[in-house]
Amino acid sequence: MDFDFTPEEQAFADKVDKWLVDNHDPVVMDPTRENFTQLADTPERRAFMKKLAAQRWLGMSWPKEYGGQEIEGVYEYILNEALAKHSAPQIGKGVGIIGKTLIRHGSDFLKKEFLPKILNAEVEFAVGYSEPQAGSDAANMQLKADKVEGGWNLNGQKIWTTSAHFADWYWVGARTDQDASKHTGLSLFLIPMKDKGLEVVSLPTIGKDTTNQVFFNDVFVPDEYMVGTPGMGFQYISEALDLERFTMFTLSPSTERARLLIEWAKEAKRDDRQIKDDPNVRRLIARIVTDQAVAKGLSVRFVCAARKGGKPPTIQSSQYKLFATALSQRVCKDALDIQGAAGQIREGQDEGPIRGRFEGAYRATVVETIGGGSSEIQKNIIARRHLGLPKNF
Amino acid sequence: MNLDFSEEQQMITDMARAMFEEHSDMDAVRKLEDDPKGYSDGLWKQMAESGLLGLTIPAEHGGGGQSLLEAALVYEELGRALASVPHFVSAIMSGGMLTEAGNDAQKGAWLPKIATGEAILTPAWLEPDRGYGPVGVQLAAKADGDGFVLNGTKQHVYFASSADRLIVLARTDAGIDLFLVDPKAGGVEMRQILSQSADAQYRVTFSNVKVSADDRISAAGSGWATFETAMYDGIVLLAAQAVGGANKALDITADYCKIRTQFDKPLGAFQALAHYLADASTRIDGGRVLVHEAAWSRANGRSIRRLAPMAKLFCCETYADATRMCEQLWGGVGFTLEYDVQLYFRRSKQLQLSWWDTPYLEELVAVDVLDS
C-alpha cells in the first residue's frame, strides 16, 4: 500500500504544475470558470489544447501503435487534477471517451480517421446520449436509425449535448433495431456536426454554460461511421460513461474551492468577530475537509483499480462520482451559509466574498449530480453490480 | 499510488477473520452481553497465540512490532465480528502509552505481559459529567510523601474488573499525570454500569488511594500528551472497527433484501430501498480508504493530527447512520432482539460516543485547519 505517487509520477506532477504556471493564460485559465471551462469555444482554448498535445500529454495511456505512450492511467489522473487545479480546460471527451472506445471497438478505418486527430487536438466532439424521453436511462434512447443503402438514416432528437454548438463531430447513440431489447438494439455513430440534417438549438443554463438540443432530419451516416458491432452501442456507452465519470468530474475544483473557503474564513469578520470562531462555521469546515479527504480516497481507489487494466472499474467510478458530485454541491451550499447575506452577490463583483466565487459555483455545480449519469443511476449501478440486488427496479 | 495489501497483510486479514468467525460468532457475542468480565478466555487465548495481542507492541518487549496499518486490518475484522475483547484498552491504549512514555521498569514489567495476554491494563480516563478534553480530568492526585493520594471517580472504564492495572489520568499540581494503579489497592471500588452495547464497563471510585511515585508514567505534567498520542493511534483503529461493523451490517441487510419479499417483489427491487444501501456502501468504502490513509501515514512517520480525527468522525458517523438505515430495511424484525442487526445498531452509536465524540473530533479538525 502506498498513498504517495512514485518518484516518476511525482516528477511528472511537478512538471505539469510548473508548465501550467509558465503557460498561464488568463482566458483559458480564468479562475472563476472552474472545470467547465472546456465548454467555452474560444480560439485561445483550442490553442491551449494544441499546446497540451505538443507536450504529448494527450492520450498518454493509449497503446503505442495508436500514438500513445502506454503509460498508466495515473498519469492522466495527475494531468486532469493539475488542469483542474489551475482552472485550465480539461483534456476533453476525445482522448478519454471516444479515443479509448475506438481503440477497443472501432474499425481500422475509424481509428485511422480519428485517433491521430484526437492526439493532435484537431477535433472537438459532442456526445449525444440523452433524449427528452430517455434522460439518464441511456437504454431508452429512441433516436431512430433506419438501414438504407450504404448506411443509416437518422431521425429524432437529442438533448443536453453540451458541446454541440462548437464541436466538429457528434458521437451519437441511436436505435438500429426496433425489435431488439432496450439494451441490445442500440448502436454508436460518428457524424459531422456540420451535416445539413442536424439542427442545433442552444439552451442557456443557470450556470454560465450552454447546453443544446439537436434535431436529426434525415441524417445519413455511411456504414463505416458506425462504431463497432451493430446492437452493441449500450455496452460501449456504459464503458465510455465509466471513463467519463472519472475524466470529467475531477476532484480538484472542489478541493480548490474548499481551500479558498478556508483561507477566506480565516480572515473574514462579522460583527467585529472572526467568522472562524463561530462554532457552527468550525463544524461545517471540519466536515467539508473530512468529506474532501473521503472523496480523494474514492478517487485514488478508482485510479488504482483502473491502473490494473482490463475493463473500467465501474463500481469505484460510480461511488466516486456519486459522493464527489454531491460533496461539490454541499461545499458551495455550506460556503454560502457561512457567508450569509453577502453570499448572494453575483459572481464577478468585488463586493462579493471571494468575488462571488461560491455564488457562481452554487449555480454551476447542480449539473454535476445529473450530467454523466445522474446520482440515481450511479446508485442503481452500485445496488445491482456491487451489492447484487435484484434488477427489476 | 497503490492500495493493494501485501501478501503478509492479506494473511493477517484472513487469519483474523477466520479466528473471529470461529470464536466470536453471534451466539458468542450474545452470551457476553452484560457479562461482568466481557470477553471469553477462548478467543483471548487464540489471539495471544496468533500474535494479535502483541501485534503493535515493540518486538524488544515481546510483541510483533507491526504498524498501525496491520492493526487497522485486524480492527476491521474485529468490527465485523463484534468481537468483545480488551485488546483496545490493553494492547492499544495502555500498551501505546507505556511504549510512548513508560520507563524501562514499567515497560519491562507490563509490555511483555500485555503481548501475551497474561496481563490486562485499561485506562481510567473519563469522569461523570465531564468532557473528553484535558479539562475533563479532575480526579485529584495530591502529593503525599514520596507518592500521591488519589480521590475522585472515573466512568466508562472498560474491562476494569479484569484489569491488572488501571492507568489513571489524574490532576496534579503539575497538570495531568498518568498513574499505574492496582485495582485491588485499598480505596478502589468499582461497579459495573450497563451500556447500550451491553459491554463490560465500570464506574471506579478512588478514595484516598495511595500510589507510589514510581508508578507515575513519565515526567510530571506530561500525562495528557502521552494519552493524546495513544488516542490518535487508537481512534484510527476504532474507525477501522466502525468500517468493519458497518460493512457487515450492510452485507447482512443486502442479503435480507434479496430474499424478503413484499408486494410480490424482493425488498432490494425497490429503488427507494436499494438507494439507501448504495449510499451506505459508498460511504463505507470511502471511509475505509481514509482509515488506510491515516494508518499508512502513521506507519510512514507522518503526522495524523488531521487524518486520525477525520477517520473516526467519518467512519463512526457512517456506522451509526448505516445501521439506523439497516434497521429501517429490516422492518419490524430489525428491532427485535432475535435478529442480529440490532447488535450492530447498538454498538455503532456507542462507538461514536466513546473515545472522542463527533463535536470533539470536529473541533480537533477545525483547530488543525483554521487555527494553524
Image: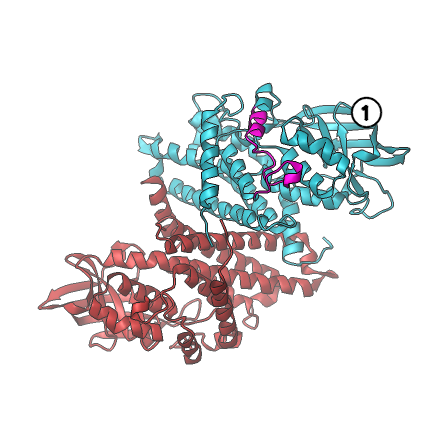
Residue A265 visible here: yes
Q: Secondary structure at mark 1?
A: loop
Colour assigned to chain B in the rendering is red
Residue B325 location, x and y as percent? 56, 57
Q: Along the line of sight, which residue is nearer the eye, A31 or B314?
A: A31
Q: Along the line of sight, which residue is nearer the eye, A280 or A33?
A: A33
The reply, left or right, for residue B31 in relation to residue B142 is right
Chain letter matching colour cyan: A
Residue B154 location, x and y as percent? 28, 66
The reply, left or right, for residue B235 in relation to residue A294 is left
User: Disc 1 residue type?
Assistant: Gly
Residue A342 location, x and y as percent? 44, 27
Identify the residue position indicated by label 1 in the image.
A197
- Residue at 77 percent across and 30 percent down: it is A191
In the rendered structure, the residue with mark 1 lies on which chain? A
- Please state the extent of the stretch shown in magenta in the rendering: A48-71
Q: Residue lying at the far front in this picture: please name it.
A: A65
**Up-down relation of residue B173 to residue A27 (above or below):** below
Q: Residue lying at the far top in this picture: please name it.
A: A43
- Residue at 63 percent across and 58 percent down: it is A387
Q: Residues within 10 Å of mark 1 (few under 14, many from 20)?
A: some
**Up-down relation of residue A258 to residue B99 (above or below):** above
Residue A4 location, x and y as percent? 44, 47
Picture quadrant where residue A246 is located: top right
How many numbered callouts? 1
- Residue at 44 percent across and 64 percent down: it is B75
Picture quadrant where residue B49 is located: bottom left
The reply, left or right, for residue A98 in relation to residue A198 is left
